[in-house]
Amino acid sequence: MTYKAEYIWIDGTEPTARLRSKTKIVADGAEPPTWGFDGSSTNQAPGKASDCVLKPVFVCPDPIRGGDDVLVLSEVLLTDMTPHPTNTRAKLTPVAERYADQDSWFGIEQEYTFFKDGRPLGFPAGGFPAPQGFYYCGVGADEVYGREIVEAHLDACLAAGLAISGINAEVMPGQWEFQVGPAGPVAVADQLWVARWLLYRIAEEFEVAATLDPKPVKGDWNGAGAHTNFSTQAMRSSYDAIITACEALGEKAQEHIAGYGADIQHRLTGMHETAPWSEYSYGVSNRGASVRIPWQVEVDKQGYIEDRRPNANADPYVVTRLIVDTCCSALEKAGQV
């Protein structure tokens, strides 16, 4: 007997990497083995030396095929078994291990937009829908578009055992959000990539495309982000540690902006619930700040912060690495661990 293993990996497309996948038939009782692919077709190798290696790092049930079939998220390696230059997970792992004693938790809010026939789902042909306002967390056929896809995706993520924690309709028609977490920096990023793959794959069945474009429609429409909620053990018990983390993020603001997704300047304009990409700020209950401290965190004097800057198209391995490195090193230096 055999089972199907769908190998999923992140390619080398720039400025925003894409997901790829293919199927391997594996003997029952055997673990998904190291495999390979043609890197010359994924922007990861030249044709004269095209072999790249797939190393399984996260395996979960395949909710689409069912049965004993699995999804196999894999790192990309060179043939000498060292990380491929595009392998951002390999850059995160040592940082996560270095600060593992601080017990970092993440919750990532993944916004995305459905497109059909070249326009956002719910946009009329040759025109625009009513202005934003009623679509956010809306209900009714005149306000919500694509719910059947969203529900199918939620069920698939739950069946796969992912730490998905919620869904909601967003501010623009055809725009939605799902949340992954709480989980550690590596786990949340692994599971977000798999959840993205499931989103694309399930939308196929409805002949709809899902995009992580951070500004899918120009003009007076909200962009799409990946707001990243973060805490350490110290932050979950001390408001002083919350402030230390916020100040540390400000000191490395431009380094973070550079790693938070392509075309970030189109989304972080200072309008539509964003701070300007070139400025840094933090504040309590302020969705116009770079980093928001939830109101209950100020009341409780402990909790977490929300970095509102990451784009929908950001690489979660890069985002979590930057936040852990910046905040945990600052907390360690301040003796707040």
Image (cartoon, helix red, strand yellow):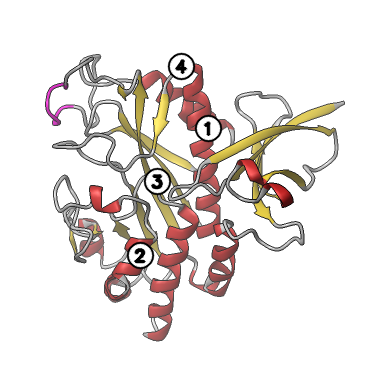
Under mark 4, the amino acid is Phe
Question: Contact (CB < 8 A) between labels 3 and 2?
Answer: no
Return the disc, 4 or 2, that comes first in the chain's sequence: 4
Question: Contact (CB < 8 A) between labels 4 and 3?
Answer: no
- Badge 4 is on which residue? 206
* Cα–Cα span, label 2 and label 1: 28 Å
Of discs 1 and 3, which sits in the foreground?
Answer: 3
Q: Helix, strand, or loop for circle 1?
A: helix
- Badge 3 is on which residue? 313
* Cα–Cα span, label 4 and label 2: 36 Å
Residue in view at x 21 percent, y 66 percent: 280
**Disc number at residue 256?**
2
- Badge 1 is on which residue? 198
Q: Quadrant of the N terminus?
A: top right
* Cα–Cα span, label 4 and label 3: 22 Å
Return the disc, 1 or 3, that comes first in the chain's sequence: 1
* Residue 109 can be seen in this image: yes
Q: Residues within 10 Å of mark 4 (few under 14, many from 20)?
A: few
Under mark 3, the amino acid is Asn
Q: Helix, strand, or loop for circle 4?
A: loop
* Residue 13 place in picture, x, y as percent: 51, 46
